[in-house]
Image: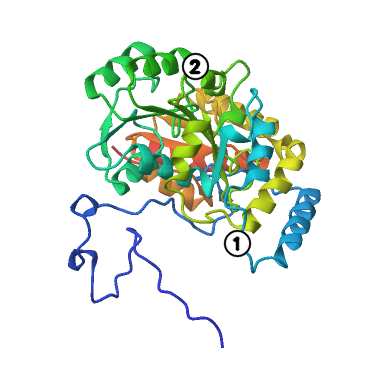
Amino acid sequence: MSAPTLPAPGPDGRWADRLVTLADLPIRDELRGSEPYGAPQLDVPVALNTNENSYPVPEQVVEAIVAAVRAEAAGLNRYPDREAVALRDGLARYVGHGLTVHNLWAANGSNEVLQQLLQVFGGPGRTALGFTPAYSMHPILATGTGTAWVDGRRKADFSVDAENAAADVRKHDPDIVFLCSPNNPTGTALGLDVVDAVLAESRGMVVVDEAYAEFARPGTPSALSRLGASPRLVVTRTMSKAFALAGARLGYLAADPAVIDAVRLVRLPYHLSALTQAAARAALAHADALLATVEAIKQQRDRIVDELTARGLDVVPSDANFVLFGGVGDQKTVWRRVLDEGVLIRDVGLPGYLRVTAGTPAETDAFLAALDAALRDKEQKPA
């Protein structure tokens, strides 16, 4: 018997053929009217909307992961190592900066890491400060943990400077500050002067989200170098992007050992499966092979920046594996026209702007051709 097929949800991610709706349920007031997070998952020839690594996992790494998972399979009747010590040790050796297993923590994607930080340092009566536009899950996770959210200020070029950031911390007195470097969706990186200024003004935790750090241009600093300066600094990263392991769901943080102890207070029992730990350890053992595509992706990112700039568009300089560009007019219309050409990019909700992931050379070719078609249609339409 074949498995039943679920009806397709509507554009808001909900199913319409239900007698009971969210309005009928006693959900928390602050969640009413919210929409679930999620980029469109469409079957298209070229998907460049979620900042995945377009290159598949190399065959030798696939074999290593399969062997590691197979070795764990016979023992799945037992719980995994709830402290993930071997994995954390591998992550510490990867990130360097003199860090040890006691400075690293891992979870199911950086989203769970961020949620755990909010669970232990945020919550009802506490406030988180971020600088939007930034990673949209930050305020969603804050709401989910009952943490109030306030916005800081970005400049017109989407940058954050030390003076304004420090002033926003003084104004709002947050319990947690979120900084993104490189920032999603803009691709802009932070100077360490911003991190230093926020740490100096803040009484609470400062979380620097470095999910795209491996794609940064030469000379772009990492907040990892500041970890010894304050026990309130946390740097979060992921294996989803540069490591091409989005499907494995493995994120991690680096911080003072006391922060690790604090997060352990709220972690779920055995939160990382034995299979996840085994796959991630195998990937770390083959980090060079997995990271071999990073430079190729950066070349395509820089190519996109150059090509879009030559077309007269407003391109934001990027240290990530994606490019934010504006000057397209009605971004929803252009997004749809690009999709009609078989290329899926991202409408991040900024009027006049769209975001595209840097992928393979062929994917860049397809994107540029689709965008040119969309812009031609826009110019040909009567005013």
Residue 160 versus residue 331: which sits nearer the camera?
160
Q: Residues within 10 Å of mark 2 (few under 14, many from 20)?
A: few
Q: Earlier in the sequence, mark 1 or mark 2?
A: 1
Task: Left or right? Give the position of 365 relative to 171.
Answer: right
Instruction: Say the numbered circle drawn on residue 229.
Output: 2
**Real-space Cα distance between discs 1 and 2?**
37 Å
Q: Quadrant of residue 87?
A: top right
**Whether residue 78 is visible:** yes
Task: Left or right? Give the position of 172 relative to 289.
Answer: left
Query: Where residue 326 sits in the image (x, y, percent)?
Result: 40, 30
Instruction: Answer above or below: position of 196 versus 186.
Output: above
Query: Where residue 219 sits in the image (x, y, percent)?
Result: 61, 15
Q: Secondary structure at mark 2?
A: helix
Instruction: Answer above or below: position of 230 versus 214.
Output: above
Query: Where residue 200 sits in the image (x, y, percent)?
Result: 37, 14
Residue at the (18%, 68%) spot, across then down = 24
Label 1 amino acid? Tyr
Instruction: Say the numbered circle drawn on residue 40.
Output: none
Looking at the rendering, in which quadrant would you find the C terminus? top left
Label 2 amino acid? Ala
**Whether residue 255 is visible:** no
Instruction: Say the numbered circle drawn on residue 79.
Output: 1
Residue 354 versus residue 133: which sits nearer the camera?
133
